[in-house]
Amino acid sequence: MKSIRLIHNLPRSGGTIISKCLAAQKDVILLSEIHPEGVAMRKKMGGDATFFDPINQCQKWNNLFGDNEYKKICNSSYNFEEKIDLIYKKTEVANKKLIIRDWAFLDFFGKPFIEPSYKNSLAEAFNKKFEILNLYIIRHPLELFISCYKTLDFFKYYDLSFFFNGYRNYFLNASKNNIFTYENFLLEPEKNLKNMCNILKVDYEDNYLSKLKDINLTGDPTAKNSLKIQNKDNIAEKLFKKDDLDKIKKSSEFINLMQDLKDYY
């Protein structure tokens, strides 16, 4: 059975910069924030859906298809899985390795655009046809919530119970041996990136930092082209009042989630 490589991350958990580092490896073609409902949901959000179509990403950023072939595909009625099949076959012919970054937000948060399914839609779309090489990225839940709250307008309508439930379901869907924390990645990027490449069966090259500025991806527009660590000590204490923070840490949702994450935080 052929293998397909998938990266999973919730928003604001380092997925963009980590994906850039993987896309900078030799002979890799990386598709970013791909989901079976991605194009429709992006249109619903009111944004440009062009680069949420996998064919468009491959062509605009990797020039995978010839001009005539690309036009023919665009004028055809391929469904999502058929498009991925076309891309997979094309990368094989070109001796490239395909990595797909999931748009996990839609599955585990989703609102106000779609009800979360709490299942990994991308993996389910491929698990009968491919051996799936999964890689999951996590970030401390309080840090993640605060980052989302500060940068994503619609997160202001999320309560912490809904957020923790979505995070917990994301984590419970993860393959326990293939989980990386954003915090550890920033502390030891080379070590973590080598391990990621090993899981995804991609050759590691240590000159990836020099290529980051040339990598085009969807995702966080503030993601830098370096791995400089910023001091974010006590960020939760700065956003929440002490009494409110104490209530959060004593809530059953937070306690249950942190129990699940005990091997990581």
Image: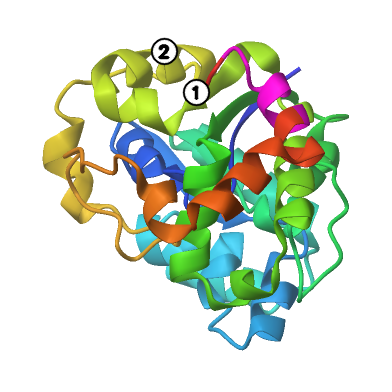
Which element is circle 1 on?
strand
Which label sits on residue 180? 1
**In the displayed structure image, the side of residue 67 where residue 44 appears, left or right:** right
Q: Is residue 259 magenta?
A: yes
Q: Residue 17: horizontal and vertical position, in percent?
A: 34, 45
Which element is circle 2 on?
helix
Check whether the beta carbons of the residues at disc 2 and disc 1 lie within 8 A of each other. Answer: yes
Which label sits on residue 195? 2
Of tags 2 and 1, the one toward the viewer is 1
Q: Residue at x 75, y 36 (%)?
A: 168
Q: CA distance from mark 2 to mark 1?
A: 9 Å
Q: Amino acid at mark 2?
A: Asn
Q: Residue at x 28, y 38 (%)?
A: 24
Q: What's the magenta region? A: 256-263
* Label 2 packing within 10 angstroms: few (<14), some (14-19), many (20+): some
Which label sits on residue 17? none
Q: Relative to residue 218, is residue 234 depicted above or below?
A: above
Q: In terms of depth relative to the viewer, which is nearer, 32 or 178?
A: 178
The image's colour scheme reads rainbow
